[in-house]
Image (tube, helix red, strand yellow):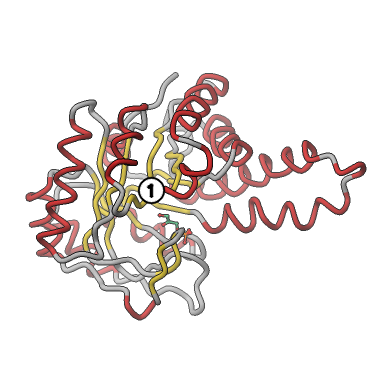
Amino acid sequence: MALVTLKYVLENARKNKYAVGSFNFFGLENLRGIVKAASENKSPVIAMASTGAVKVMGEKVVVVAAEKLSEEYGVDIVLHLDHCKDDLEMLKRCVDNGFTSVMIDASAYDYEENVRQTRLAVEYASRTGCSVEGEIGHIGGVEDEIVVSECEALFTVPEDAARFVADTGVDALAVAVGTVHGFYKLPPKLDFDRIKKIHELTPVPLVLHGGTGVPDDDFRKAIPLGVLKINVGTELKVNGYFNVMKDFTPQVKNSDPRKVALKIVDKCSEIVTEKINVFGSADRL
Ligand code: 13P
């Protein structure tokens, strides 16, 4: 069992018409929960660390933990760096240490600068075969240290998406189509026509960010339109981690953190299992 590339798992997803869940982790407990769910459901998964999570855990530790959990649970997984902005050195360290996928997010810059930075990432990652996700248009919300108000979110222009893929050589493309990061204040309104148009014009799999709080039926509708990677973070962070600690810790006798850790593993695994079933990726390994 091994860490496999994003390109590889998304090619299988495309052929067999499902999407692969990409789940944020911030510690060993929730990484274990993600890999456990993948194994129990025989599903491909993408375990992703934000730059903030990599800073806390260290890229070498993250790679070894992901490799060993993949072996322990007998399941291939993708190890992905999420939203790397303005830190090409971190992206390079992740590639050098064995991440199998990285996201370069220069979407806040103008088109030329976005292309320039994304190409640098693609050139570097291609040395080892590591996959690269880029972003065109700008997905709003709260993502680690990134704060963008919802109204500033800029939807992806389909023609720009096609040009961006041709100019950069990315393996997957994050698009702004009505989702935002974090909990929604109002129900999300996905622009399915835009997703369809982007898909018609671009050859690479599309990535839907901001999966927390998106209705299951919206996911089911987006997958046949070319969305093959779906990111879920906040649900794991808040429901899978923080709320478990908050609610369960007072009940634990002798302040034993191991008991809380086990609850986090199980809750994260439960959340990931739910998504796997909606995305149609169970029994695909
Ligand atoms: P949510 O936190 O809204 O689920 O989004 C996660 C994400 O898109 C990470 O890139």
- 100 versus 165 height, above or below: above
Image point (60%, 41%), residue name: 30
Image quarter in which the N terminus is found: top left
Image point (47%, 44%), residue name: 55
Q: Mark 1: is the Cβ under 8 angstroms from ligand 1?
A: yes
- 113 versus 255 height, above or below: below
- 202 versus 181 height, above or below: above
Image point (28%, 66%), residue name: 138
Give the x, y percent position of residue 264.
69, 44
Image point (38%, 40%), residue name: 80
Q: Is residue 83 left or right of residue 39?
A: left
Dot 1: what SS? strand
Give the x, y percent position of residue 250.
86, 54
Image quarter in which the C terminus is found: top left
Give the x, y percent position of residue 122.
18, 40
Q: Is residue 82 left or right of residue 186?
A: left
Give the x, y percent position of residue 89.
29, 41
At label 1, which amino acid type do we have? Asp
Q: How many marks?
A: 1
User: In the rendered image, which quarter is residue 259 located in?
Assistant: top right
Q: Is residue 141 left or right of residue 194?
A: right
Toward the viewer: 80 or 56?
56
Task: Residue under label 1, please give it.
Answer: 82
Residue positioned most to the right? 253
Q: Is residue 15 left or right of residue 277?
A: left
User: In the rendered image, which quarter is residue 221 located in?
Assistant: bottom left
Toward the viewer: 40 or 176?
176
For ligand 1, the image quadrant comes to: bottom left
Mark 1 neighbour density, 10 Å: few (under 14) some (14–19) many (20 or more): many
- 231 versus 257 height, above or below: below
Toward the viewer: 128 or 208?
128
